[in-house]
Image: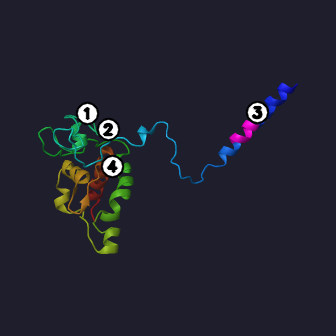
Amino acid sequence: MRKGRSCGLGTALLTVMIVASGCTRGTTSRRPPIHPNPNMDVQPKYTPQNTSEFFYDGATMRLPLPGTIARGEFSEEPTLATGRLADGSFATTNPLAGRPHLVDRGRERFGIYCQPCHGESANGRGMLYERSGVESANLKEQRIVDQPDGQLFDVITNGLGLMSGYKYPIPPEDRWAILAFVRQLQQEGE
């Protein structure tokens, strides 16, 4: 009987010690914490735009391998991705023309990305003009109407003048849809 009693007392004492040690968490101490494996706290590493004696060119940032394509940037149809034909000239027509709901999608995307500057009717007098007096390009001007579709796609993709490029926020199919909607606006006239 005595043996069972001392075992119960030892278990109770151990439980009290474990609970009491948890109560000291968050208190300050003059002793540094114990790190069983400190190699993750202090390790050699390169930071961007830094120099390196390890690499032959002295730069820490490595260039991608030739032929590397970023995720989401591969296109089996180069005209669809660039707006240019194989010979490097601009495509004259929209490669997605005739797809159902293309203009509807373009209207939606135009309202999000283009309308604030170019205005609802694409006359270049959007909110930017109303608030600051800066007029954007009038997409109904004859010089813009006469440009091939690939050239306008290139402007949407890479930007021109004050307009920034929309290569990354807008997928290529949506850029072509915006172009289809702009062409419809141009046919409607002023």
In this rendering, the label closer to the viewer, 1 or 3: 3
Secondary structure of residue under mark 2 = loop
99 lies above or below 141: above
Q: Earlier in the sequence, mark 2 or mark 3?
A: 3
Q: Amino acid at mark 2?
A: Arg
**CA separation in Å, label 1 and label 4:** 18 Å
- Please state if 53 lies on the left or on the right of 98 as rendered: left
Question: CB under 8 Å between callouts 2 and 1?
Answer: no
- Please state if 27 lies on the left or on the right of 187 as rendered: right
Q: Amino acid at mark 4?
A: Ile
Which residue was labeled with disc 3?
11
Rendering coords of residue 41 (x, y %): 42, 43
Observer-nearest of 39 and 29: 29
Q: Amino acid at mark 1?
A: Glu
Which residue was labeled with disc 4?
170
Question: CB under 8 Å between callouts 2 and 4?
Answer: no
In this rendering, the label closer to the viewer, 2 or 3: 3
Mark seen at residue 71: 2
- Work out which residue is located at the far right of the displayed protein and give it: 1
Q: Earlier in the sequence, mark 1 or mark 4?
A: 1
Q: Earlier in the sequence, mark 1 or mark 3?
A: 3
Magenta span includes 14: yes
